[in-house]
Image (cartoon, rainbow, N blue to C red):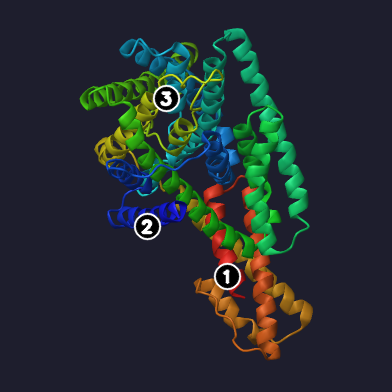
Amino acid sequence: MLLVELLILFMVCAVALGWLARQFKLPYPIALVVGGALLGTLPRLPQIPFDPQLILVIVLPPILYQAALLTSWSDFKANIRPISLLAIGLVIATTLAVGGALKLMVPSVPWAAAFVLGAIISPPDAVAATAILSRLNIPRHIVTILEGESLVNDASGLVIYKLAIAAVLTGAFSFGEASGQFALVSLGGIAVGMALAFLFIAIHRRLGDPLIEVITVLTIPYATYVAAESLHVSGVLAVVAAGLVRGRYSPEIVSAEMRIMARSLWNVLVFMLNSLIFILIGIQMSDVMHNLGGIPLSDLLFLGGFITLVAVAVRFLWVFPVAFLPHWLSGKLHERNAPPHSGELAIISWCGMRGIVSLAAALALPASLPDGSPFPARDLIIFITFCVIAFTLLGQGLTLAPLIRKLKVGSDWSMAHEHHKVRDAMQAAALATIDELLEKEQVPREWARPLQEEITDRLALSTPEGPALSPQAEWQTRLRLAVIKAERRELIRLWRNNDISDEVMRHQEEILDYQQAQL
């Protein structure tokens, strides 16, 4: 009965926090962190017994897989250098800096446990940042860099996290061995993810049923993660690789009905998982605070604030020098490339909000060591992680939009040009298909005129009603389906040729999906 009551509490909290986020026009992670903090203040809140290792398995695969599916592969490749420097170099630097800061402030914490905290809070979460950036016409390459960083740094941060936990559990650490293991589990995870992605693509082409397709899509991230972990390679990187590969083939192998169903299902699932983690940390926080009762709350908050400042400062100290270094080097040789825009670098530096991945990693910490002794500083690590998430989401998240306006970074209209380009090309393909079918089937040209006017004026399509259709109405329905097929072919052609971005392609694809479903 307790589990049922807690489930009802979870659903009510998720609805309330989602509604509040919508009312105040906030990214929902900000509302969730506030709700989790308030939930943690409730006295005598019942604890949920759970296996910490299940947290990562349940939460991470679908979240990472969805992010990988929506990542533009062409944009990702075009920005691979800054993404790699942020997602790998900055993650390592943050892990070392935060670990050193915790050891400095609390000398009793073992080095390995300190680096566990560093690995936990090293990967920023782009959900809150991109939700704000998308409303302000920020240049697309900034959003691409932040999304690509968030995708890869989750993987690199969690690989380091597992190596650090292994060092705590075994009490031994070798830099050379750890580096070799990092490379092995990373490359192995990518290989497993790509292999399973192509296997699922081959299977998906033969399904043909929207419900089975959706179930298959939900199975892919979990099956990939479990398979990779069973082979002792990175399940996180396997899921990311599988999502990137499958996302490249998705427009051609997925039906319109399945895309409509999956779009809503993914959004609901990711929101529910985010809500689950933040509510779960709220429930756990009362127990954590009880275990930390010997330390004054003011000291704990000061420590959390200090670690947050270190994480934020490291990002600034990394982004600016790394961004200007290639210019300085090339400037000495060629005096050619203009330096990066300092306002854009400031925005990238300020987008360091932590989120669900850090929280899930903290909750997944083992409760005890192999000898039965408690995991060192586990409660302190969880508390500091929540502080960093709360301080960055509230501090950086709420000030990001004013900072963008102050720095006058924005007004990127290149995507609007792409929308016009793709609509013109799709309209030309549709009208050409109408002329071709009119000539082929020798039907009166008046039958196609209403649809031609619809396409020209871009009006919403309407379908004839009733089980019995007239020959004209039946032919017009077939014509509309042929037109949508032609538009989809042209859309994919433009996308394959890199004439339009993935975001524009997905937007137009969604319109075609709903038009096709209507028919």
x then y, percent, for residue 409: 33, 38
Does 87 appear above or below 141?
above
**Please, what secondary structure does the residue beneath circle 1 have?**
helix
Q: How many marks?
A: 3
Numbered label attached to residue 378: 3
Does 417 appear above or below 172?
below
Residue 242 is drawn in which quadrant? Answer: top right
> Mark 1 vs mark 2: which is more N-terminal?
2
x then y, percent, for residue 73: 60, 40
Q: 515 left or right of 26?
A: right
Numbered label attached to residue 60: none
x then y, percent, for residue 422: 56, 57
x then y, percent, for residue 458: 51, 71
Q: Nearer the viewer, mark 3 or mark 1?
A: 3
Separation of disc 1 and disc 2 at Cα?
Answer: 35 Å
Residue name at image x 39 percent, y 45 percent:
279
Which residue is identified by label 2? Answer: 12
Which residue is identified by label 1? Answer: 515
Residue name at image x 54 percent, y 57 percent:
265
| Of the pair 486 and 131, the residue shown nearer to us | 131
